[in-house]
Amino acid sequence: MGPIREMLAESGINEQKWRVLRVLDEEGPMEQTALARRACLLLSSLTRILKTMEGEGLLLRTPDRADRRKSIVSVTEKGRNLIHTHLPQAEQIFQRLQARYGVEKMERLLDLLEELHGFDP
């Protein structure tokens, strides 16, 4: 995460905020519980992060039309701009990792991380 942290320091966001933005940008607006799961964050932590990000103008929370107790989270234009500003650099970091470890190891790593994420002790 070192290279990613350095990249993000330029914009003043941390890796948790980056993950939230990337998930929403890639998958579209979603309910907070699903977002917490996809971004690998505890719901209580995500709630605090979302409040901050909403204040920074990076995302928007709106009540779910089907269940007003839930919120739907989406990326704002400002958040999308931040993602697209850093995306080329993030892709370069990934390409350097892939060049160092190879495609097969990187795919295996991603598969293992996905399996670990799904682990329910």
Image (tube, grey):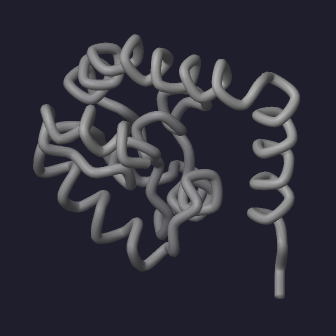
Q: Position of residue 63 (x, y in %)?
A: 41, 54
> The C terminus lies in which quarter of the figure?
bottom right
Residue 46, quarter of the rendered image: bottom left
Up-down relation of residue 4 to residue 114 (above or below): above
Compared to 114, does 6 lie above or below? above
Q: Position of residue 51 (x, y in %)?
A: 23, 61
Q: Please identify the residue farthest to the front as the structure is shown.
A: 100
Return the residue nearer the eye: 10 or 96: 96
In the image, is residue 79 above or below residue 68? above
Q: Left of 100 or right of it: where is 85?
A: left
User: Residue, x 55% and y 61% (percent of image)?
Assistant: 36
Q: Nearer the viewer, residue 20 or 117?
A: 117
Residue closest to the eye, 96 or 119? 96
Q: Who's the residue at 50% across and 63% down the image?
A: 70
User: x%, y% of residue 60?
Assistant: 29, 42
Res 5 → quadrant: top left
Residue placed at 40% from the left, 11% from the top? Answer: 88
Q: Is residue 120 above or below residue 74?
A: below
Q: Residue at x 63, y 52 (%)?
A: 38
